[in-house]
Image (tube, rainbow, N blue to C red):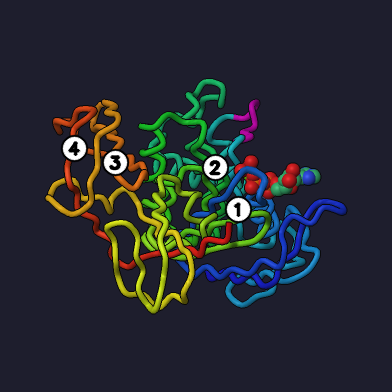
Amino acid sequence: MKLVIENLNAGYDADVVLQDLSLSVEAGEFLSLLGPSGCGKSTLLKTIAGIVPAAKGSVFLDGQDITHLPIHKRGTTVLFQDIRLFPHRSVVENVAFPLKMQGVPKGERLHRAEELLEKVQLAGYGNRRPSELSGGQQQRVALARALAAKPKLLLLDEPFSALDENLREDMRTLVLQLKEEFHMTVILVTHDREEALSMSDRVALMFEGSLIQCSTPRQVYSHPASRQAADYFGNCVYIPGKVEGGRFTASGICFETDAADGSYDLMLRPGCLDTETEGEYPVQVERVSFRGSDLQVSFRASDGTLWKKTCPAGADWRPGDRMKAGLQIGEPVLFLRNY
Ligand SMILES: Nc1ncnc2c1ncn2[C@@H]1O[C@H](COP(=O)(O)OP(=O)(O)OP(=O)(O)O)[C@@H](O)[C@H]1O
Ligand SMILES: [Mg+2]
């Protein structure tokens, strides 16, 4: 289902949280929503689902204006971080609950709930109480229950954040599989940048109630729309320089650009530092941290910038090592320096 949000304003009493927010999500698309705590991600999901009313603007699902439709008529389901299973009902009754609300007869709804439990790899657990399951199993029950209503738009609000890394990975795979099988459009709110970059067709970045960028994971990482967007993904390296007459120059770096004359910072990511081949960019190893599957090596360049780079665990770097590295700048990202 295609979701279109136009100039949406929403909030709580006098507090406006979402400000003229517009967003379009294609049918079958997987979109991740990232942003600092309190920027309005949950509020956006709740407004799409009808839990928080829109003060202004519109929400369309497949062309139908759902802005003022009640929650249960929207075809959207939200899965919250605190999963809120009914403690006194069995697992299968929990999953069947949305079907009960839809008036599906008992035999049929229990049968469908068992099928869904199978999908989330919990066949045979139907008669237990939620308290007799592990945290990860409870998350999967909640997911099965969210799917029972056959949502065309599934809204996931940090559903994996309480799980350990292995279980999170299993849940990610499961959600992606079910998304294909059920032909759903999915919006995932997460604080985990790698999760967002690896799972999504597009990533939307939100600050203070507004979207500041919405593009493919590669684009949002390599070509951030602003310094704020760049810093959100961390690990940026900024090299100060100047543009004069269509040329950017910094110590040891020079390339042509369309940017107007002025002082700029060239934004680079650690992957741009090529320590495998000899280049023109002198660096010295400052710190080496062993992290199990890899090393994090801090390189200090002669221009003062610090590069924290992930290197293979077997690499033989020691503090004090010097080399002339290469710089793979690709399509450069320049931010005007106004301080
Ligand atoms: N029920 C509420 N009543 C009043 N204000 C609220 C309510 N829920 C959220 N807010 C406020 O609205 C703003 C946005 O909150 P929201 O929960 O949407 O943020 P978020 O981006 O989901 O943050 P987090 O990443 O911490 O979950 C915050 O300033 C928050 O304090
Ligand atoms: Mg939230």
Q: Is residue 287 above or below residue 49?
A: above
Looking at the image, residue 74 sits to the left or right of residue 68; the answer is left
Q: Determine which residue is flagged by label 4.
A: 322
Residue type pointed to by label 3: Lys
Q: Nearer the viewer, mark 4 or mark 2?
A: 4
Q: Quadrant of ligand 1?
A: top right
Check if residue 88 falls in the magenta segment. yes
Q: Determine which residue is flagged by label 1.
A: 77
Percent x, y of residue 20: 71, 68
Q: Is residue 10 above or below residue 175?
A: below
Determine the secondary structure under disc 3: strand
**Total labels drawn:** 4
Percent x, y of residue 230: 47, 55
Q: Determine which residue is flagged by label 2.
A: 158
Where is the C terminus found, in terms of image quarters? bottom right
Q: Earlier in the sequence, mark 3 or mark 2?
A: 2
How many residues crowd mark 3 within 10 Å: few (<14), some (14–19), many (20+)?
some
Percent x, y of residue 83: 60, 36
Residue type pointed to by label 2: Glu
Q: Marks 4 and 2, how far apart in space? A: 43 Å
Q: Earlier in the sequence, mark 4 or mark 2?
A: 2
